[in-house]
Image (cartoon, rainbow, N blue to C red):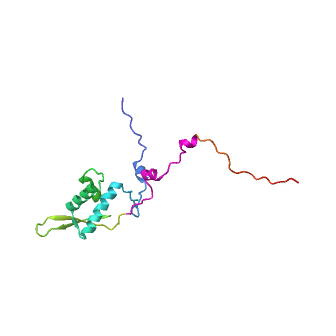
C-alpha cells in the first residue's frame, strides 16, 4: 500500500500571499496600577519614612534592616526579609528609587535607596471596622420584662360635653 500523495494542483505561492496582517502598536499600553495590599503599603510607608528621616540616600541593606525592625515593632505580619526586598524592588522607580554608584576607595558598586517620583497614595479610611460597629451599637431587642408586661390602659379620658338641652 502506498501513502497518499498530495495533489499537485496546490500552489504554495497563494498561501504566502495571504499572510495575516501585522498589528502595529503606536503607543505603549497604560497599565492600571494594582491596589497595594496592606502588607505592601506598610513596607513602602516604613521605607519612605526612613528615607525621609535620613534626608539622604540610605544604603541598601541598612534600609532593609530598618524596615524589618519597623514592621516588627508595628507587629505587621510578613514572611521574611526577602519579601521586603522584593516589594521594594517591585516599586523601584515609583515610590522608592534604587541608586547605584561606584565607591572611589574600593572600586565596588554601592547601592542606595532614595525617594521615588510617585508619592504613596493616602489610605482611605471610609469603612468602620466590624468590632467598632458592634461596640458602638446599642441593643435594640426588647427586655424580657417588656414581653411579660400587661398592656396599660390609656390615661386619656375623653371629656364629654354636655349636650343636654
Q: Is residue 93 visible?
A: no
Q: Looking at the rendering, which quadrant does residue 162 occupy? A: bottom right
In percent of width and height, residue 41 lies at 34, 58
Left/right placement of residue 119 relative to residue 55 reads right
Q: Looking at the rendering, which quadrant does residue 57 occupy? A: bottom left
Task: Identify which residue is drawn at 57% across, 43% down.
Answer: 146
Left/right placement of residue 95 relative to residue 152 reads left
Q: Nearer the viewer, residue 15 or 94?
A: 94
Q: Quadrant of the C terminus?
A: bottom right
Left/right placement of residue 56 relative to residue 153 reads left
Task: Identify which residue is drawn at 18% across, 65% down.
Answer: 110
Task: Identify which residue is drawn at 19% across, 67% down.
Answer: 101
In percent of width and height, residue 24 lies at 41, 60
Q: Nearer the viewer, residue 154 or 124?
A: 154
In percent of width and height, residue 72 lies at 26, 55
Question: Which residue reaches farthest top?
Answer: 1
Question: Which residue reaches farthest left?
Answer: 105
Magenta stretch holds residue 9: no
Magenta stretch holds residue 134: yes
In percent of width and height, residue 93 lies at 30, 64
Task: Identify which residue is drawn at 53% across, 44% down.
Answer: 143
The mark total stands at: 0
Range shown magenta: 121-147
Q: Quadrant of the N terminus?
A: top left
Q: Nearer the viewer, residue 145 or 103?
A: 145
Amino acid at each position: 500500500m502506498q501513502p497518499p500523495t498530495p495533489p499537485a494542483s496546490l500552489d504554495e505561492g497563494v498561501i504566502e500571499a495571504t499572510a495575516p496582517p501585522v498589528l502595529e502598536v503606536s503607543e505603549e499600553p497604560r497599565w492600571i496600577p494594582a491596589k497595594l495590599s496592606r502588607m505592601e503599603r506598610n513596607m513602602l510607608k516604613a521605607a519612605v519614612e526612613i528615607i525621609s528621616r535620613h534626608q539622604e540616600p540610605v544604603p541598601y541593606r541598612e534600609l532593609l534592616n530598618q524596615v524589618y525592625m519597623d514592621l516588627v515593632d508595628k507587629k505587621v505580619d510578613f514572611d521574611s526579609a526577602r519579601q521586603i526586598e522584593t516589594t521594594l524592588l517591585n516599586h523601584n522607580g515609583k515610590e522608592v528609587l534604587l541608586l547605584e554608584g561606584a565607591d572611589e576607595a574600593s572600586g565596588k558598586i554601592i547601592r542606595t535607596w532614595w525617594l521615588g517620583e510617585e508619592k504613596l497614595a493616602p489610605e482611605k479610611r471610609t469603612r468602620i471596622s466590624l468590632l467598632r460597629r458592634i461596640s458602638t451599637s446599642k441593643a435594640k431587642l426588647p427586655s424580657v420584662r417588656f414581653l411579660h408586661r400587661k398592656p396599660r390602659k390609656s390615661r386619656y379620658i375623653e371629656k364629654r360635653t354636655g349636650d343636654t338641652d
